[in-house]
Amino acid sequence: MTVSALMNTYGERTTTLTKGDGAYVWDSEGKRYLDALSGIAVCGLGYNHPAVTRAICEQAEKLIHCSNLYLIEPQQALGALLVKLSGMDKVFFSNSGAEANEAALKIARKYGQSKGISNPEVITTVSSFHGRTMATLSATGNDKVKAGFEPLVEGFTHVTYNDLEAIRKASTANTVAVMVEPIQGEGGVNVPASDYLNQLRALCDEKGWLLILDEIQTGNGRTGKFFAYQHNGILPDVVTTAKGLGNGVPIGACLAQGQAAEVLQPGNHGSTYGGNPLVCNAALAATQALIDEQLIERAASLGNSMLEAFKTALTNTAIVKDIRGKGLMIGIELSKPCGELVAAAKEKNLLINVTAGNTVRLLPPLIISDAQASEIVSTVVDLILELQ
Ligand SMILES: *Cc1c(COP(=O)(O)O)cnc(C)c1O
């Protein structure tokens, strides 16, 4: 064993992944795993998708990077495609999810300042996850990830998720925006009431607040629509995404419409790498493949059948508290902590995740076959039954 030079941010890691193909990855010992996690909702097209690989190689031969001081063709094309798919007006590209949220929060603050609010406040929710930078950490509704990093950034109020009254009560004259995930990912795949986003939209309209949706995990087809808010037929003022956008290249996006799209002006924001030619060409190919291969519709139907299969197999299982999700974002909440299931699944050649301590989280690639979906269901069911 060599001593690792890396900081211990991820705890002990025992498996080295060295290659992938479709929904499978291999470790350095040659063992093959069916991947029901996709690098945490990143590789929606699976591994080695030919269109993405080609886009990366072709762009690398032309121009990997140039400054945002110049026009970038794949960035313009990706921006236009995302605007069309989302119904938003404008986009800013970043390198990660947290940075996309930073852009959204800067929009909220400057929007508030422009209305004469000198101490703008953003309402976010308990059990939310918005990132690890200082502002997004402060926005996050999980005390564990914040501990030790005080002083936090001011101007955030946390309220119960899926509770509109809580937002009304917590709001003040300084409130400028509400920021939520359409389904809380890290918080346990928490699915709100089906009209929660509609009610939020109406409340934000009534009060003149921006509705900011963090779709870093739920975006890019994951829940069976390109963005999860499209299930509700609403438009947020600002939406952020990242994970599934580039199928593995680091890219994030903050999209905005209406007034919010005009808030950031020259000099207000920027990023050296954000939206560079390489990542944009990859994300353009990945997004186009989602559409060409009808993977968003596929996520919706396959997600439904997997959810039904879990419900049928686990209805009378005492340890199972809830089975929930949308599209290929599925959570199975157990009545006790179940972190050990990750290693047990690995033994059975399956990669899964446990979040919020007691919730098995499945985020398989959108390209999985019916047989692979059945294999995920039967293996996870066995693992849970063995835990009883
Ligand atoms: C992963 C995630 C983030 C943070 O994204 P990074 O790319 O890790 O910075 C923010 N919000 C949500 C909902 C996420 O799932």
Image: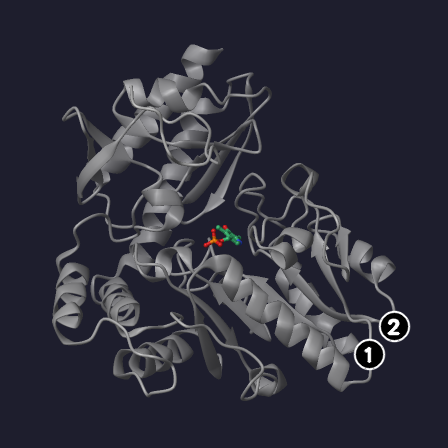
- Residue at image mark 2: 173
Name which residue type carries label 2. Answer: Ala
Name the spot of residue 56 as percent of width and height, x first. 18, 64
Q: Tell me which corner region of the image, top left, top right, bottom left or bottom right, holds residue 40.
A: top left
Q: Residue at x 21, y 61 (%)?
A: 293
Q: Residue at x 49, y 11 (%)?
A: 388
In which quadrant of the rendered image does the N terminus lie? Answer: top left
Closest to the observer, 322 or 103:
103
Q: Is residue 249 above or below residue 278?
A: above
Name which residue type carries label 1. Answer: Ile
Using the image, tell me which numbered label, if any, was put on residue 277. Answer: none
**Residue mark closest to the camera, 1 vs 2:** 1
Does the rendering let one see residue 328? no
Closest to the observer, 313 or 184:
184
Q: CA distance from mark 1 to mark 2?
A: 8 Å
- Residue at image mark 1: 117
Q: Is residue 66 above or below residue 247?
A: below
Name the spot of residue 14 as percent of width and height, x first. 33, 24
